[in-house]
């Protein structure tokens, strides 16, 4: 099992397969994508080597992220590669959801068991203003399709001060009958969006305390779960979760490592820089990569430094998938 100097074990790999995205979210790529070409991103054979290596070191969950992973035509093959790797028990995808309705069945057949869909507002006008896309209706249809094909669905909703009116009410009404988990995520500062952060950052603690006072009960975390604190209520089909990166001891139970679409290891979302390891991937060198990972993990810090406004090399989230 991969373990760092603080005794944290890493069951969970977040694998970016592209930096490209065709949405223009205010907090990520408001001016659109202008990064490396698709020829720069990891190939299927490189991904196979990477996932096999992590699995041999005890990783049991792979989340495929972007950018927007559905922009890769070979995404079903990537899902199948991950799902068929011995030791990998769960394959998930983070997506904006605009292509989910047409792809849910294919992704499910390939081995995807969970999707995280970004929906920052259930108000169509707010959604359009945040993302630059008028596609909320299509995305909600995709959520229904995913559920129909046995894929569990989590909704990622970034908390933005300017779009807070009616947020909780609309989501509660929706999950009354819809079996999805809505996770409210505090906006995190990145290098490109420091001004936006100062204007739009909103603590999730108030919402968390509100739902607890209304009878929501916390659910115990699975070993390979992400950082969300999740809650259920007997009167609701869906769940609520909170990802609060500015809360005390947020990094204490860190269990995930990130690899960028360019084949760099990121020990933290807000690391100073990714660590090159593509040579191992190109050569198919599983043994060499295992040694590299064990050695490099000794350099992982105990915590990010977001509270000190140190965002590292992460200029926007499309670089590494959040």
Image: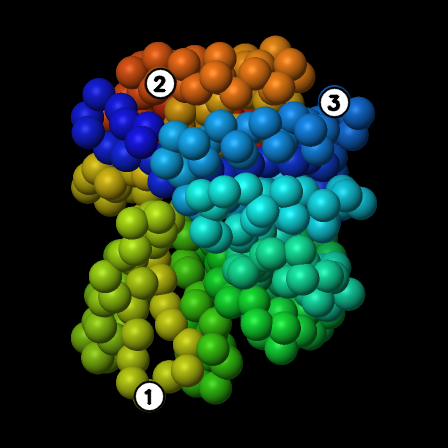
At a point 47% along the width and 77% down the height, the residue shown is 179
Residue 202 pos. (x, y %): 37, 51
Residue 87 percent across, percent down from the top left: 44, 43
- Badge count: 3
Residue 120 percent location from the top left of the image = 54, 60
Q: Do the residues under discs 1 and 2 have CB atoms within 8 angstroms?
A: no
Which residue sits at x=24%, y=33%?
A: 8
User: Which residue is under mark 1?
Assistant: 235
Left/right placement of residue 112 relative to residue 181 reads right
CB under 8 Å between discs 3 and 1: no
Q: Secondary structure at mark 2?
A: helix
- Give me the disc on residue 294: 2
Residue 41 in sight from this viewpoint: yes
Q: Which mark is residue 116?
A: none
Find the distance from the CA under tag 2 to the CA under tag 3.
26 Å
For discs 2 and 3, the disc positioned in front in the rendered view: 2
Judge whether residue 312 can be spotted in this image: no
Q: Which mark is residue 40?
A: 3
**Residue at position x 72%, y 45% from top?**
77
Label 2 crowding class (10 Å Cα cut-off): few <14, some 14-19, many 20+? some
């Amino acid at each position: 099992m991969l373990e760092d100097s603080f005794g944290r074990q890493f069951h969970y790999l977040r694998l970016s397969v592209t930096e490209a995205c065709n949405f223009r979210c205010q907090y990520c790529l408001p001016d659109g994508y202008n990064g490396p070409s698709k020829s720069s991103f990891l190939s299927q054979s490189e991904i196979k080597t990477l996932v096999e290596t992590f699995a041999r070191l005890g990783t049991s969950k792979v989340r495929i992220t972007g950018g927007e992973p559905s922009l890769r035509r070979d995404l079903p093959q990537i899902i199948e590669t991950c799902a068929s790797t011995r030791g990998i028990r769960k394959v998930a995808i983070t997506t904006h959801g605009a292509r989910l309705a047409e792809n849910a069945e294919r992704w499910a057949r390939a081995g995807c068991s969970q999707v995280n869909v970004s929906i920052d507002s259930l108000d169509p006008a707010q959604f359009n203003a945040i993302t630059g896309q008028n596609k909320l209706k299509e995305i909600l249809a995709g959520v229904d399709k995913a559920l129909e094909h046995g894929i569990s669905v989590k909704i990622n909703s970034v908390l933005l001060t300017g779009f807070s009116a009616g947020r909780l009410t609309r989501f509660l009404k929706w999950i009354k009958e819809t079996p999805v988990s809505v996770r409210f995520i505090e906006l995190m500062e990145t290098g490109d969006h420091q001004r936006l952060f100062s204007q739009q950052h909103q603590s999730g603690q108030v919402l968390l305390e509100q739902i607890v006072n209304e009878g929501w009960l916390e659910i115990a975390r699975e070993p390979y779960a992400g950082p969300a604190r999740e809650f259920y209520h007997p009167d609701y089909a869906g769940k609520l979760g909170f990802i609060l990166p500015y809360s005390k001891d947020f990094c204490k139970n860190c269990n995930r490592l990130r690899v960028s679409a360019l084949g760099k290891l990121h020990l933290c979302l807000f690391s100073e820089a990714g660590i090159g390891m593509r040579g191992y991937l190109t050569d198919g060198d599983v043994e060499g990569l295992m040694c590299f990972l064990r050695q490099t993990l000794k350099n992982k810090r105990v915590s990010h430094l977001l509270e000190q406004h140190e965002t590292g090399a992460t200029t926007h989230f499309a670089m590494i998938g959040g």
